[in-house]
Image (cartoon, grey):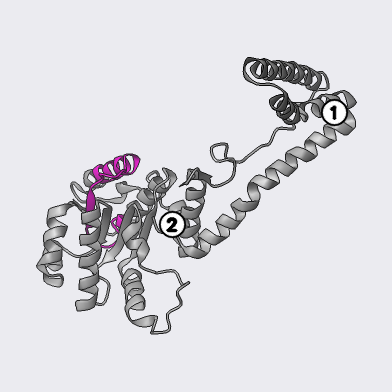
């Protein structure tokens, strides 16, 4: 999965101090309790000696005797903890008042479970990527719930729109490694971008990495990688195109609005073919008809679009115009 390098550095740095801050806050609360309640401090002081007592027992005893000594220490600790909890209750203080309170208990605010990135850090990285690319606002405003197909008046258009939104909601709710590739075909203002944003928001919230970009911006990134970096390439500069190959779901909006040439056609083929080979899902939105797609792109691309993608046909008139009727 490819993340924006600047976002990764920023959030990784945030996590580096997160656990320490939680531990320091717990220590402050513990010291506060000790200053207010000497009987609790006495118990805490005794509990703090546990490690030393086990070390001393290990130095003096072996075998069953050592096991017996450790069991005795644990039993004493259990009684001390019970007495401490009773005192906290007596003073009207929550039992977990001085416990370390992590934002994420799965990774203890480290950002990782072993060598694997925790879902909490992954979610922050994905959302940071959306915010920096501007799609965060779309996710907030374009949802399944506020997609209104009833503006359509043509026969069958409302039923078609309702069927599509139901399908898209199911697709997002069940998105996974084997999800279908989708080809949204239809005129301007029929909700293709709206539903793409709704899918993005839903899939992101389930912990997947989604990249949603217009065809124009996507091919601009490839042009920059090919022609814009020059020979004095900064090795620390993040690639602009890796994310299109590595993300869990790629959504290409407004295919066909880009400047058509052999370079963009080659890039499109590379993206589609590579992701098909990796089993990574793609959703493509276009205002072009099937015939238009065949005329604009060569057979290597159209055979994959019509053979490996499920076509979703959007019917009706531009909803922005219908709202004015």
Left or right, 39 with respect to 48, comes to: right
Where residue 100 is drawn, which disc sits there? none
Residue 313 horizontal/vertical position (percent): 19, 53
In this rendering, the answer to whether 180 lies above or below 65 is below
Closer-to-camera residue (67/175): 67
Left or right, 248 with respect to 289, comes to: right
The residue that label 2 is drawn on is 138
Determine whether the residue tagged by mark 2 lies in a helix, strand or loop: helix
Residue 233 horizontal/vertical position (percent): 42, 80
Q: Looking at the image, do the residues carrying marks 1 and 2 touch, with CB atoms under 8 Å apart?
A: no
Closer-to-camera residue (265/164): 265
The residue that label 1 is drawn on is 41
Q: Earlier in the sequence, mark 1 or mark 2?
A: 1
Q: Is residue 317 visible?
A: no
Residue 165 horizontal/vertical position (percent): 29, 45
Question: Which portion, as a residue range, is magenta?
Answer: 163-192
Left or right, 88 with respect to 37, comes to: left
Quadrant where the C terminus is found in the figure:
bottom left
Which of the 4 quarters of the picture holds residue 42? top right
């Amino acid at each position: 999965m490819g993340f924006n390098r600047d976002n990764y550095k920023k959030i990784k740095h945030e996590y580096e101090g997160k656990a320490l801050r939680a531990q320091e806050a717990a220590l402050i609360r513990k010291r506060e309790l000790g200053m207010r309640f000497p009987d609790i401090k006495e118990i805490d002081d005794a509990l703090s000696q546990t490690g030393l007592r086990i070390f001393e027992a290990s130095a003096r005893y072996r075998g069953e005797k050592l096991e017996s000594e450790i069991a005795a220490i644990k039993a004493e600790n259990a009684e001390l903890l019970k007495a401490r909890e009773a005192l906290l209750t007596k003073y009207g203080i929550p039992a977990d008042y001085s416990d370390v309170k992590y934002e994420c208990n799965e990774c203890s605010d480290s950002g990782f479970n072993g060598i694997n990135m925790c879902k909490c850090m992954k979610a922050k990285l994905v959302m940071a990527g959306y915010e920096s690319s501007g799609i965060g606002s779309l996710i907030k405003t374009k949802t399944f719930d506020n997609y209104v197909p009833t503006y359509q008046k043509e026969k069958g258009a409302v039923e078609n729109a309702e069927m599509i939104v139901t399908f898209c909601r199911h697709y997002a709710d069940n998105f996974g490694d084997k999800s279908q590739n989708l080809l949204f075909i239809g005129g301007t203002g029929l909700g293709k971008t709206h539903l793409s944003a709704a899918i993005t928001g839903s899939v992101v919230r389930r912990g997947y990495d989604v990249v949603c970009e217009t065809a124009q911006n996507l091919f601009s990134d490839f042009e920059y990688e090919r022609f814009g970096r020059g020979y004095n390439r900064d090795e620390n500069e993040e690639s602009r195109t890796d994310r299109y190959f590595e993300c869990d779901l790629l959504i290409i909006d407004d295919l066909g609005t880009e400047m058509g040439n052999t370079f963009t056609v080659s890039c499109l083929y590379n993206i589609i073919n590579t992701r098909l080979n990796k089993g990574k899902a793609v959703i493509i939105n276009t205002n072009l008809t099937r015939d238009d797609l065949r005329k604009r792109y060569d057979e290597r691309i159209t055979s994959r679009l019509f053979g490996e993608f499920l076509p979703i046909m959007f019917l009706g008139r531009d909803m922005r115009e219908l709202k004015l009727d």
